[in-house]
Image (cartoon, helix red, strand yellow):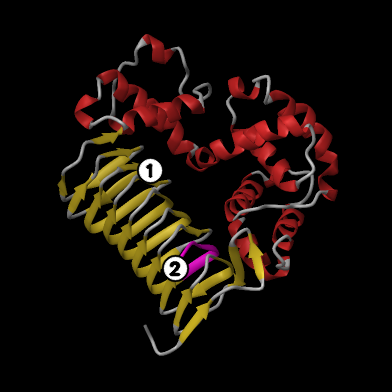
Amino acid sequence: MSAKLLQYNSGDHVLGNKNIVEAITTDGDVVFNESYIVVGEMLEAEHIHATYDLSVIGSIIAKSISINGDFVVKGNIEADELICRGALVCTGEVRVKKINLESYSTVDSIVGEELYSNDNLFIRTTVDTDSCFETDGLVVAGEGIMGDGIFKAKAAIANEYFEFMGDNESKVFEISEMNFSLTESITETPIEDDIEIAKVVDTFNKTFSKSLIEWSRLEEEEFIVGIRRITKSMNDLHLVDRVIDKIIELSYDREITNFRDFLYVLCAKNIFPEGVAKYETIEPVLKDMYNVAKPKVKDMEFKVSSITEFACSLYILDTYQTQLPISAEDGADRIFSSIGLRFTTVERAWREWNG
């Protein structure tokens, strides 16, 4: 640690059990002694340590980053070394020389030299490592896996290519290069449109519980079919359980009064397969309640009880903003105002997220 140290304890603004603070740039070290949400274009320091969870709505740069809890970044991560003991979720690029992940992780892309993980790793686009890539779990890349040195995983699935030049010690599925005949039971369900998310999740659960040598050919084929869907809808799948719970809860309330709940319903209308959307409990929420609530959105308050709900709401707003009855800026202002931040504080970062 450098001589210049900035510590964050309990803050003035709290969301659930997490404190809120604006992003800073310093040439010293930063320590978060409580769970924190950092909002702003860039959090930059020499060394950054979080004793509990850390969420950054923006990008983060440091020589070393150490997170004891979950680490959520709505932007890019750049560091010489990153250690994350909880789950890592990053919507941008992770550019780190050495990275140690001790729990489930999902990122947009990774560029580095050494990567070590104790759990499953989902990469929306690509991962590129120079000397070592080792994980005890499954690796899924929406585009490809490349690098040199040692590659070791429980199994690796690359949607388009696997170009690892070093020592590969794993079973690899390179989907674009596969030619297999699907059984009748599989071909009855079109891959692109009708496959149900529940079936994909069930396939994952069954697959993770078995060793590689227990996979039959049919299970592998079903697994690949599921991966095709997952690599296209990875972010949506992370919301499925939470959104389903909220829709079922709303079916008992019979009214949408919270802007957060309206966003969840909007997400459900986009990601639920037709069969799920027509369930007796769900269909009235997605149709009748949604239509009644839509003209009332401009007057709705936004309330959340956790950082996960806050992050999910931002993601849904960003993804489906063109379908909202209000502007994305109005929606973002409502969300950030709920935690005591002015939209002008984060307006620049918000506009960059949306191109």
In the image, what residue occupies the spot 61% across and 71% down? Answer: 21
Query: Which dot marks residue 51?
Result: 2
What amino acid is at disc 2?
Thr
**Which quadrant is home to the N terminus?**
bottom left
Location of residue 51 in the rendering, given as x and y in whole percent from the top left corner? 44, 68
Q: Can residue 355 be seen in this view?
A: no
- Distance, label 1 to label 2, CA atoms, is 34 Å
- In the picture, measured across the screen, residue 84 lies left or right of residue 328, that is left
Vertical relation: 257 (above or below) 218: below
Disc 2, SS: loop
**Earlier residue among tags 1 and 2:** 2
Residue at 81% in and 39% down: 294
- Classify residue 204 by image quadrant: top left
Label 1: few (<14), some (14–19) or many (≥20) C-alpha neighbours in 10 Å: many
Horizontal side of 82 relative to 131 (left or right) equals right
Please provide the residue range marked out in magenta: 51-60
Q: Is the magenta stretch mostly helix, strand or loop?
A: strand
Does the magenta segment cover residue 295?
no
Residue 309 percent across, percent down from the top left = 62, 50
Q: Which mark is residue 143?
A: 1
Residue at image position (40%, 60%) is 94
Q: Look at the picture and state if 242 lies above or below 68.
A: above
